[in-house]
Image: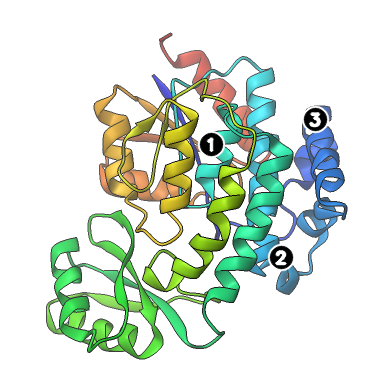
Amino acid sequence: MIAFVFPGQGSQQVGMGKALAAQYPVCRATFEEADDALGEPLSRLCFEGPADALTLTANTQPAVLAVSVAVCRLLASRGARPAMLAGHSLGEYSAHVAAGTLSFADALRTVRRRGRYMQEAVPVGDGAMAAVLGLDAEAVARACADAAEGEVVSAANLNAPGQVVIAGARAAVTRAGARARELGARRVLPLPVSAPFHCALMQPAQKRLEPELRSLVVSDPDVPVVANVDAEPKRDAASAIDALVAQVSAPVRWEAVVRRLAASGVQLYVEVGPGAVLSGLIRKIDRRFDAVSVGDPEGVAAFEARLLEQPAG
C-alpha cells in the first residue's frame, strides 16, 4: 500500500519545480494554473526567487503547495494511485487537493491568506520556535509547563522520537529550551521562522481563517487524509474542514500520523513535493519504514522504478 505525504513550510528552495515544468507538460500547466489563480507569477518566484521573497510565509505556502500539486498530477498521469494521504501542516492542504476535497485554485488562495494571517497574529520578534532534540514528548511538555510563567509555550510539531518543536512567546521559548536541557535534551536549536506556528498564539489567525474555510465549495475526499490534529483519517468534507481549522493553533502530530498510516497497512511513503524533510522524519520514526522523495525529474524516475517493484494493492 502506498501513501502520498506532502511537505510543509521549510521545504522551499529557489529553483523548485523548474526542471519539472521544463520536462513535463502537466507540471507546466499546473504552474500556469497557479499563476492564473493568484493573478501573479508564482511560478517565477519558485523557479527564480529571490530567496527572501520566497521565504515570506504568504508566498512560501502557495509556492510549496503548487510544486506538490504539480508533482502529484504528474505521478497520477503515470498511474500512481495512493491508498492514503497526509501532509505536514501546510501539506495537509496539498493532500486535500490531491483527494479532491478542495480545488487547486481555492487551496492556493486560502493558504496565501493563511500565511498572512499567521504572520499577522503575532508581531515579528515577539514569538519564536525551537527544535528540542533528544528528549521525549512528555519531558518536553514538562519543560514548557515549568517555563511558561504565564506566557504561551508548548509543543508545536511532534515530528519523531526525540524531535519536538516548541513554539510560543520568545522569552518563554528561551526558558523552556533551557529547562529542556536541564531535563536531558541533547540540543535545543532556535528555528529561523517569522511566527510561532501551531500554538495558542495562532488563535487570532484561526478565527480569521475559519469562516473562509467553511465558505469554500468542498467535496468528500476520494482518498482518506490523515489529519495533523488527531492522526485520524478524514473521509468526509465536514471533518476535513474541521481538521484544517483546528490545525492552525494545534500541534502537528506527525509521528502519530505516520504510525496511523503504518497501522493501516502503508508500506511505501512517497514524499510528494520539494525537499526530503518528511522522508527523513519517517525513517527516524521507524528505520523499517520505506520512504522516497519525489520533487524533481530524478525523483520521478526513481519512484517509477520503485513502483515496478511494489506489489499491487
| Nearer to us in this view, 309 or 196 | 196
Residue drawn at 83 percent across, 36 percent down = 28
Which label's residue is closer to the chain start, 2 or 3?
A: 3
Residue 87 in the image: state x and y as whole percent: 47, 43
* Tags 1 and 2 touching, CB below 8 Å: no
Q: Which residue is mark 3?
A: 24
Task: Kindly tell me whether residue 288 is visible in this rendering.
Answer: no
Q: Which residue is mark 2?
A: 54
Residue 34 left/right relative to 264:
right
Residue 71 in the image: state x and y as whole percent: 66, 35
Residue 97 in the image: state x and y as whole percent: 61, 34
Residue type at the position of mark 3: Tyr
Classify 55 as above or below 73. Answer: below
Q: Which residue is mark 1?
A: 95
Classify 157 as above or below 2. Answer: below
Which of the two marks, 1 or 3, is nearer to us in this view? 1
Where disc 3 sits, the SS reads loop
Which label's residue is closer to the chain start, 1 or 3?
A: 3
Which of the two marks, 1 or 2, is nearer to us in this view? 1
Which mark, residue 78? none
Where disc 1 sits, the SS reads helix
Residue 169 left/right relative to 25:
left
Residue 217 in the image: state x and y as whole percent: 64, 33
